[in-house]
Image (spheres, rainbow, N blue to C red):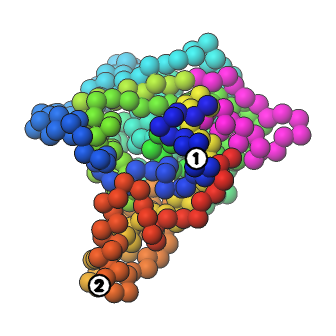
Amino acid sequence: MFRPEVHDPLDSVLCVEDLFYHTRLHRPITKKHLLFLLYFPIGVCVLVLRILFFVLSELLLFRLFAFLRLNSFFYKIYASALGVFIRVHGRENIDKNASIVVSNHTSEFDIIALRKFMPVAAISPRFYKTFAFTRRMIQEVKPLYVDYTDRSKIRSDVKQHLRTSSVPVLCFPEGALTNGDTGLLLYHKFLFSLGRPVQPLAARVVGPFCSVVNVHHLCTQVSHNIYWFLLCPWKVWHINVLPVQTIQPGETPERFAQRVQRLTAEKLMLIPSRFSVADKAVLMRRWYRIREGNRLFRGNAKRLERRASKIFEQHRLVSVPLDGPKSIGQAQSCVEAIHSPRATGSARLPPRPVS
């Protein structure tokens, strides 16, 4: 059931750290890294051109094609120009009556890829409004801006949309990004408690240099991830459309969410873990302390606390206080730990059995 390079039959536990990338470059260094180094000057040129296209689209092209009522047509051109391509499998499973679409979450560009595939209203964090060069693009996915600290408001906004609009709601029930190579976070049960048909999608992203560069990793800002994505040649989203699921008699919303999670994981040959977005928040706090341990010890804790809070907000997580190292030796060991492909020591959380 599991990909052999992911599931070790001698290791019966999955640790939360296995679900995320920890560094920008894959370890160990291989010949593919040399190829990426040769490509890098070309990638910088590609990045500049795409940024210019960003600006031109925001200032002119989105408005022009909206006036011509060719929004969907231009959006496909826009996504392709950014290097976002899709391959859809299982189109026969698409149900137009499904008002909720759920997918695993492996990239900040998942919304663009899924919007290229079908019209959706994406549940989006409010800080997306602060992105000046993507404001028009985000408007095209008809975002449902939510404040993740006010759950009652999220519920009312989603229910209001389902009552008044025929456009399905898109949600990433994991609540946070994962690496897409190991397993899935636990699906949140809210959207599975509304008594609506749910259309599950299972997405995998492939492309040149995927085995070299991690476009996103723990404790990195969204803007940095976007720059690295635009620097790469292209990515292809393989979107698997799974049969529509409905809650069964006697089945709780939590069980329903876990069942959809398992179906998605099986399609992608991943592990349906019992780790939640809260576990990622704890890991990020500890990993941030490891990465910034030396500077924390030098007395910049307040500035780093503000920076950490910003990163946590962008990752839709609840920020928690940082604990700085207590000595120079501890700070140095924290800094050195980041070079390991897998977090060790204080960054490691107690393992949980694989569900």
The x, y position of residue 303, in whole percent, is: 31, 76
Residue 328, numbered label = 2
Contact between marks 1 and 2 (CB within 8 A): the answer is no
Q: Which amino acid type is shown beneath numbered disc 1?
A: Leu
As helix, strand or loop, the secondary structure at mark 2 comes to: helix
Q: Between marks 1 and 2, how big is the CA–CA gap?
A: 37 Å
Q: Quadrant of residue 15?
A: bottom right
In the current view of this chain or complex, which residue is farthest to the right?
Answer: 250
Residue 72 located left or right of residue 56: right
Count neighbours of disc 1 (C-alpha within 10 A) and say few if under 14, some if 14 to 19, many if 20 or more.
few
Magenta residues span 241-265
**Mark 1: secondary structure:** loop
Going from N to C along the chain, the mark reached first, 1 or 2, is: 1
Above or below, 56 against 20 in this view is above
Is residue 253 in the magenta section?
A: yes
Please give the residue where the numbered disc 1 appears in the rendered image: 10
Instruction: Where is residue 58? Give x, y as percent.
Output: 27, 37
Label 2 neighbourhood size at 10 Å, few (<14), some (14-19), many (20+)? few
Q: Is residue 8 in view from this perspective?
A: yes
The three-letter code of the residue at mark 2 reads: Ile
Q: In this view of the protein, which residue sits in the foreground, 74 or 230?
A: 230
- Residue occupying the point 54% across, 24% down: 240
Q: Quadrant of residue 22?
A: bottom left
